[in-house]
Amino acid sequence: MSYLGESIALAVAASWTVTALCAEVASRRMGALQLNVLRMLLSLVMLGATLWWFTGVPFPSFADGKAWFWLSLSGFVGYVLGDYCLFNAYIWIGSRFGQLFMTLAPLAAAISGWFLLGETLSLQAWAGMLVTLTGIGISVLNKGAKHKVGLKLPLKGVLFGIGAGIGQGVGLVLSKLGMDYYELSIPAGMTDVSDMLPFASTFIRAITGSLGFLCVMALRRDFHTLPVVVHDRKGMGAMLLATITGPFIGVSLSLMAVRYTEAGIASTLMALTPIFIIAPAYWLFGQRVTFKEVIGAVISVAGVSLFFI
């Protein structure tokens, strides 16, 4: 029995673990906006080269207007809104807690799927939402003075983390819509184009991401910061690795995993990053990890699994 889709999904979780660790380093050294601009532009080059190598054309072929619309909207929600929040969360609360909030993505995907696709929300899905929120709460809340419960993390970082999880979940549903339209527009027999559908779809999303971040940088008049950050070798090295493992390999493989196994199974396995990242964050950054935080992460991921069992 082949477990290709499940293996790809586990590879995605490992890839996103590396992405998160590298992105934390790069975000703190370069800034979240600068990092996003550079990695989006670099990912376009990588994706274009990949498409050119396998299909002979360095850009998405045969995508119709509907595919472009939904994938572009997905890129705006997932990259411009979601990733901007995520990398700012890395600055404020670190990659370990930032990835914990990404377990909100299935919750956001379930609600947006109900709204956009007419999917039903079962009692088990609602239970999954409750368990996921409980796990996050265990990790980020503690008792303060007079037994009052409060956040042990900066509120701004928590809000960025919530925004990142919502952006990821809604973006995934929008990308599914876009890929469905894209696949319908590919002529029969074009297997090379069909096989590269995840990379081509990611290319369209990355175009929107690049344009979106460039617009934000223009509005903030921050272009003068780019020549400064590109001379930071450690920051650029971390950015390069985060780009390879994130929008190039990770995102493309996540779309591929959904094609080769059930979306629920793939999503559950890809959601293991908050657990995978605990040990590296401790070894590399010396972050203090409490037993309660580990339990919270496990419970949160268990909640994700309830969406799909």
Image (cartoon, rainbow, N blue to C red):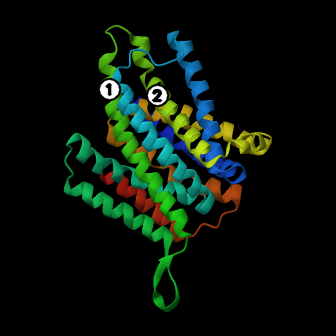
**Secondary-structure class at tag 2:** helix
| Residue under the point 32% across and 26% down | 66
Of callouts 1 and 2, the N-terminal one: 1
Give the CA distance from mark 1 to mark 2.
12 Å
Q: Position of residue 244 (x, y in %)?
A: 61, 34
Residue at left offset 45%, top offset 55%: 163
Instruction: Give the quarter of the image for residue 192.
Output: top left
Tell me if 238 is positioned left or right of 307 in this view. Answer: right
Nearest the eye: 221 or 79: 221
Disc 1 crowd rating (10 Å Cα; few below 14, some 14-19, many 20+) is: some
Residue at 33%, 47% in the rendered image = 109
Amino acid found under the numbered disc labelled 1: Lys
> As drawn, is 289 to the left or to the right of 304?
right
| Residue 20 x/y as whole percent | 59, 48
For residue 66, which numbered disc appears in the image? 1
The residue carrying mark 2 is 204
252 versus 304 height, above or below? above
Using residue 198 as the reference point, say whether residue 43 is left or right of it. Answer: right
Callout 2: few (<14), some (14-19), or many (20+) C-alpha neighbours within 10 Å? many
Task: Classify the position of the N terminus by image quarter.
Answer: top left
Say what amino acid the circle numbered 2 marks.
Ile
Q: Is residue 308 visible?
A: no
Element under label 1?
helix
Say which of 223 and 305 sits in front.
Answer: 223
Relative to 73, 140 lies left or right:
right
Whether residue 104 is visible here, answered yes or no, is: yes
> Which label number is shown at residue 162?
none
